């Protein structure tokens, strides 16, 4: 039964498809599910802080359906793109602004979860094929630079001033978006200019194909992708806000440990996002397969799950009131 809890990951694509296939208020189904129903149920459900036993870990390593659950998100995202391209011209020709915006939120959530979150998981795999799939997913979200910055920049510099994806103490989310997006772009071109150029060209070709098939869908698709990027950057914000590593010499910081990232054991987020919310272990052990991610008592714990924390971050005074008092205990771990 351990593996089948990750079937919850298919609730998000179900809500995305419901939104894309609906008109009017129901076109916002994905947004309502992700930022309404999930926070509600996570608020009443107990957190799941236990770790797998040694025998359970051995079983996980011998089974392949975990990867299958991740890989199945890819055709679902591609299907969402195709459906979006089909319905958006109808929205625009009929002047249905409500459905158009609803469909854009559904596509943005697909970019942020089915594409970027899955790309994040696959991008850490050693197999070249998985890394190519990750890059393709990021191209479809117009954020190919994330692969380079995350793998070669963010994981090296996390919780230091050198990392543009680590939110500083007292930094407002909206200013962090600008600093992080610009920083990721610069880091990607600096670290891997050839790969960055290839993905940039791929993004241009992708948009050209969309324009050739359905020109009315081009701008909404770009805006939807940008919404997905903002979702990712908001996740970056809540995962690392205010946490820092000590500089132990002129050129080196202390090793990245579980206390240098915020952790969430809220079960729906854990299983729907393939354990992304156990982010403390991810940074301490970036190549550990997602079903094996651990809880650590020394990790700073979020008071709510990812969706609720993302909504909270959008209201800076409330965010600071909730999170700033937690930073001293977290930083002293």
Image: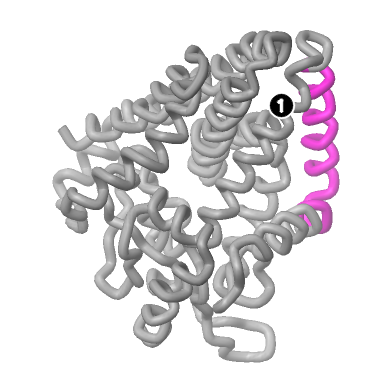
- The number of discs equals 1
Indicate the position of residue 205 as horizontal and vertical percent values: 83, 23
Is residue 126 visible to us here? no
Residue 299 or residue 229, whichever sits in front: 229
Q: Residue at x 33, y 28 (%)?
A: 64
Q: Quadrant of residue 265?
A: bottom left
Indicate the position of residue 204 as horizontal and vertical percent values: 84, 28
Determine which residue is flagged by label 1.
220
SS class, disc 1: helix
Q: Residue at x 66, y 48 (%)?
A: 146
Is 203 left, or right, of 224 in this rendering?
A: right
Q: Quadrant of residue 227?
A: top right
In the rendered image, residue 116 lying in the magenta stretch gets the answer no
Indicate the position of residue 54 as horizontal and vertical percent values: 17, 51
Residue 272 or residue 323, whichever sits in front: 323
As drawn, the residue found furthest toward the bottom would be 249
Indicate the position of residue 77 as horizontal and vertical percent values: 54, 23
Q: Residue at x 46, y 51 (%)?
A: 287
The colour style of the image is: one colour
Is 155 left, or right, of 186 in this rendering?
A: left
Q: Residue at x 51, y 40 (%)?
A: 117
Magenta region: 188-210
């Amino acid at each position: 039964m351990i593996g089948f809890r990750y079937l919850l990951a298919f609730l998000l694509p179900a809500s995305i498809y419901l939104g894309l296939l609906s008109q009017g208020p129901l076109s916002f189904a994905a947004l309502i599910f992700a930022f309404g129903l999930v926070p509600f149920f996570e608020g009443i459900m107990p957190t799941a802080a236990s770790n797998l036993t040694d025998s359970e870990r051995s079983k996980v390593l011998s089974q392949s359906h975990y990867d299958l659950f991740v890989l199945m998100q890819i055709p679902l995202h591609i299907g969402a793109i195709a459906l979006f391209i089909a319905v958006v011209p109808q929205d625009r020709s009929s002047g249905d602004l409500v459905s158009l915006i609803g469909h854009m939120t559904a596509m943005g959530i697909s970019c942020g979860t089915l594409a970027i979150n899955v790309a994040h998981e696959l991008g850490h795999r050693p197999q070249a094929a998985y890394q190519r799939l990750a890059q393709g997913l990021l191209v479809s979200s117009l954020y190919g630079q994330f692969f380079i910055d995350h793998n070669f920049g963010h994981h090296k510099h996390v919780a230091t001033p050198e990392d543009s994806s680590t939110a500083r103490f007292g930094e407002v989310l909206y200013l962090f978006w600008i600093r992080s997006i610009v920083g990721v772009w610069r880091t990607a071109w600096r670290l891997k200019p050839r790969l960055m150029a290839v993905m940039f060209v791929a993004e241009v070709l992708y948009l050209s194909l969309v324009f050739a098939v359905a020109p009315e869908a081009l701008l909404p698709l770009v805006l939807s992708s940008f919404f997905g990027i903002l979702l990712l950057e908001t996740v970056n914000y809540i995962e690392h806000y205010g946490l820092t590593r000590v500089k132990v010499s002129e050129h080196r910081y202390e090793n990245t440990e579980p206390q240098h990232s915020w952790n969430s054991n809220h079960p729906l987020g854990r299983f729907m996002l393939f354990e992304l919310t156990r982010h403390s272990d991810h940074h301490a052990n970036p190549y550990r397969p997602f079903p094996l991610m651990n809880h650590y008592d020394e990790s700073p714990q979020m008071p709510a799950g990812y969706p609720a924390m993302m909504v909270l971050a959008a209201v800076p005074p409330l965010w600071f009131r909730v999170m700033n008092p937690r930073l001293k205990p977290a930083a002293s771990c």
